[in-house]
Image (cartoon, grey):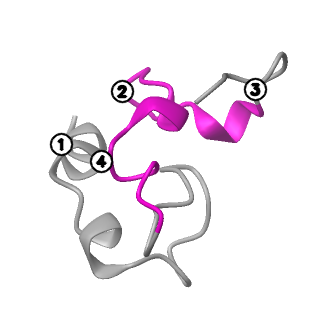
Amino acid sequence: MKMPDIIDISMFAPCGMNCMVCYKHCYRKNSCAGCLNSDTEKPEHCRKCKIKDCIKGK
């Protein structure tokens, strides 16, 4: 997979990780749209992300 030249800021997670390299985002089926994007259409495993919940708690 080749990284794009410009990365949308919403693709950087609250923890600082680039969502485009996250294994959940790279799934071909039921991929995560990124932590900062709306949860409404995300698969359950993305809505219940332990990393995202940890950041919210701090």
* Residue most extreme to the right: 6
The residue lying at 54 percent from left, 35 percent from top is: 20
The residue lying at 45 percent from left, 51 percent from top is: 25
Residue 19 as seen in the image, left or right of residue 23: right
Picture quarter with the N terminus? top right
Residue 7 is tagged as 3
Q: Quadrant of residue 51?
A: top left
Q: Position of residue 48 (x, y in %)?
A: 23, 68
Do residues under tags 2 and 1 come within 8 Å of each other at their CB atoms? Answer: yes
* Residue most extreme to the front: 1
User: What segment is highlighted magenta in the picture?
Assistant: 8-28
Do residues under tags 3 and 1 come within 8 Å of each other at their CB atoms? Answer: no
Do residues under tags 2 and 4 come within 8 Å of each other at their CB atoms? Answer: yes
Q: Position of residue 14 (x, y in %)?
A: 44, 33
Question: For the residue marked with disc 4, what is the amino acid?
Answer: Lys
Residue 49 as seen in the image, left or right of residue 34: left
Residue 52 is tagged as 4
Reading the image, the residue beneath label 1 is 54
Please state which of the two labelled residues, at mark 3 or mark 1, is closer to the viewer. Answer: 3
The residue lying at 33 percent from left, 71 percent from top is: 47
Q: Tell me: residue 38, above or below residue 1.
A: below
Q: Is residue 11 magenta?
A: yes
The main secondary structure of the magenta stretch is loop
Q: Residues within 10 Å of mark 3 (few under 14, many from 20)?
A: few
Q: Residues within 10 Å of mark 4 (few under 14, many from 20)?
A: some
Q: Is residue 35 magenta?
A: no
Q: Tell me: residue 9, above or below residue 6.
A: below
